[in-house]
C-alpha cells in the first residue's frame, strides 16, 4: 500500500537475489500483460549489488542496480550470484568480481537484463565517485560499456549537475529509491515519470534506453543528500568545494583527507558551464518527501504520531503524496492544512527552501530562515 500512498504505479521488487524474499515474490507476484502485479501495484524484478575489487591499481567499490524481465531470468541471475558468494545475508550483497565480469555474465543470461550504476556520483560506492570510482563509464566497463544505457543520479546530485560532463549526456538519467530500506517513507523519494499507456518491462526499459516517453524524474534537492559537500563527519566539518579546495581538501580539525562530495567531483570533471542544458535533457523536479516536510515544520521526528496524523489526513483528502507535493493548488491546501505546512510546500515547489548541505554520510537539513546560507558549513554551527 505504501507505493499507492506515494502515488506510484510501478515498483522494483528490490533484493530479488535473497532466497527468502525471492520465494515470496514467486508466491505472490502474478504475471499479467507483460509485467508482474500484486494488490493493484505493478512490479519489476530488481536488486542492487555491491562490487568491491581492484582495477588499474586502485580499489573500487561500486553499486549496481539490476533489472530483470521476469522471475525465471531473475532466478538465473540468483544462481550465478550464488556461485560467486553468499546471497542470503543482506539485501545488497557484496561480491569481489568486476563490473566487466558482471556485465559479461548478465548479457550471457539475457540481453534484456538492464544494469544501471547506482547513485553514480556517491564518493565511496558510486561508479564515478571521488573516493573509489572511475572517471568515466568506459573506464569501468571497458568494452562492455555498450550495454550500459542509464545512470542513476542519487540523492546528492541532479541531472543538471551530471550534464555538466559532456561524455555523460548520452546516458539516460534515472532516479530510484531505497526499496530495500525498512523505512516505508523512503519509497518514492526519487522516481521516474513515463507517458506509457501499457506499462510493461519492455516498454519501461525501452523508454529508458531511447528517452522516448520518458517525461521527467523527481529528485531530492541535492543539498539534502548525504554527500553533497566535502566533509569529515567525525570532526563535524563540512565545506563547499571552494572552501575545501583552498585547504587542500584536508580536515582542519584532524588533518586527514575529507570525504570529497558530489559537488566537488562534478566541478573536477566538468567541461560545461553551470546551468548548461543539453537539447535532449529529460526534465526533472526536486522535492522534499511530505513526511520529512511535516516533521521539519513541526520540529519533531518523522515517525512521530503528530507527523503521521497530519500525513494521513492529507493523503485521505488528496489521494497520494505526489499529488499533494506537485499538483494540489495552494487554495485547496490552505483549506486542509496548517498555514506553515502549506507555506513549506509552496516554497518547496518554487525551490526557495534553503538547506544546510549534507556531507560525509550526514543528510542535509532544510532551513526556512532566508537569512541563513543555503550551503552553511556545519562545522561552524
Image (cartoon, rainbow, N blue to C red):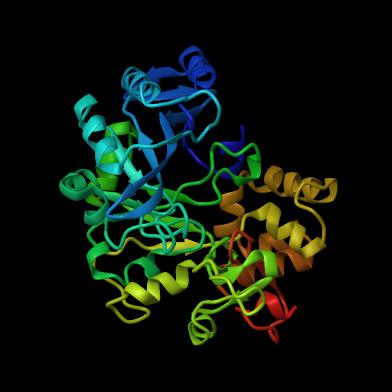
The answer to whether 304 is drawn above or below residue 356 in the figure is above
- The N terminus appears in which quarter of the rendering? top right
Vertically, is 32 above or below 321? above
Residue beneath the point at 34% across and 53% down: 151
Which sits in the foreground, 364 or 251?
Answer: 251
Residue 245 in picture, x, y percent from top left: 48, 83
- Residue displayed at 68% across by 45% down: 315
On the question of residue 327 being in view, the answer is: no
**Nearer to the camera, 7 or 378:** 378
Is 89 on the left-hand or right-hand side of 332?
left
Residue 43 coordinates in the image, percent (x, y): 44, 29
Corner quadrant of residue 137: bottom left
Answer whether residue 245 is visible to the viewer in this image: yes
Q: Nearer the viewer, residue 287 or 341?
A: 287
Where residue 255 appears, x then y in whole percent?
A: 60, 75
| The quarter of the displayed image where residue 185 is located | top right
Amino acid at each position: 500500500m505504501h507505493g499507492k500512498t506515494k502515488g506510484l504505479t510501478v515498483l522494483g521488487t528490490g533484493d530479488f537475489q535473497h532466497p527468502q524474499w525471492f520465494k515470496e515474490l514467486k508466491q505472490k507476484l502474478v504475471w499479467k500483460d507483460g509485467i508482474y502485479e500484486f494488490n493493484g501495484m505493478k512490479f519489476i524484478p530488481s536488486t542492487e549489488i555491491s562490487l568491491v575489487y581492484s582495477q588499474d591499481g586502485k580499489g573500487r567499490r561500486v553499486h549496481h542496480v539490476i533489472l530483470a524481465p521476469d522471475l525465471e531470468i531473475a532466478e538465473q541471475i540468483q544462481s550465478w550470484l550464488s556461485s560467486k558468494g553468499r546471497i542470503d545475508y543482506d539485501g545488497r550483497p557484496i561480491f569481489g568480481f568486476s563490473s566487466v565480469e558482471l556485465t559479461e555474465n548478465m548479457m550471457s543470461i539475457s540481453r534484456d537484463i538492464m544494469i544501471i550504476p547506482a547513485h553514480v556520483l556517491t564518493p565511496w560506492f558510486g561508479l564515478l565517485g571521488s573516493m573509489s570510482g572511475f572517471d568515466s563509464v568506459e573506464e569501468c566497463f571497458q568494452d562492455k560499456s555498450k550495454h550500459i544505457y542509464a545512470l542513476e543520479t542519487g540523492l546528492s546530485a541532479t541531472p543538471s549537475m551530471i550534464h555538466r560532463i559532456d561524455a555523460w549526456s548520452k546516458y539516460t538519467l534515472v532516479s530510484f529509491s531505497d526499496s530495500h530500506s525498512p523505512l516505508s517513507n523512503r519509497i518514492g523519494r526519487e522516481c521516474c515519470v513515463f507517458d506509457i499507456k501499457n506499462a510493461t518491462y519492455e516498454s519501461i526499459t525501452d523508454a529508458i534506453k531511447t528517452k522516448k516517453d520518458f517525461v521527467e524524474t523527481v529528485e531530492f534537492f541535492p543539498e539534502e543528500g548525504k554527500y553533497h559537500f566535502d566533509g569529515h563527519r567525525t570532526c563535524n566539518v563540512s565545506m563547499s568545494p571552494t572552501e575545501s579546495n583552498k585547504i587542500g581538501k584536508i580536515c582542519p580539525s584532524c588533518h586527514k583527507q575529507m570525504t570529497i562530495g558530489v559537488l566537488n567531483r562534478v566541478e573536477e570533471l566538468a567541461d560545461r558551464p553551470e546551468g548548461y542544458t543539453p537539447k535532449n535533457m529529460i526534465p526533472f523536479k526536486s522535492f522534499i518527501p511530505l513526511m520529512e516536510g511535516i516533521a521539519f515544520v513541526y520540529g519533531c521526528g518523522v515517525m512521530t504520531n503528530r507527523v503521521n496524523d497530519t500525513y494521513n489526513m492529507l493523503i485521505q483528502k488528496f489521494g497520494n503524496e505526489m499529488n499533494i507535493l506537485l499538483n494540489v493548488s495552494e487554495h485547496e491546501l490552505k483549506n486542509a492544512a496548517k498555514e506553515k505546512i502549506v507555506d513549506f510546500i509552496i516554497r518547496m515547489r518554487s525551490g526557495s527552501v534553503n538547506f544546510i548541505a549534507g556531507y560525509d554520510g550526514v543528510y542535509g537539513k532544510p532551513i526556512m530562515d532566508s537569512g541563513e546560507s543555503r550551503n552553511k558549513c556545519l562545522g561552524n554551527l
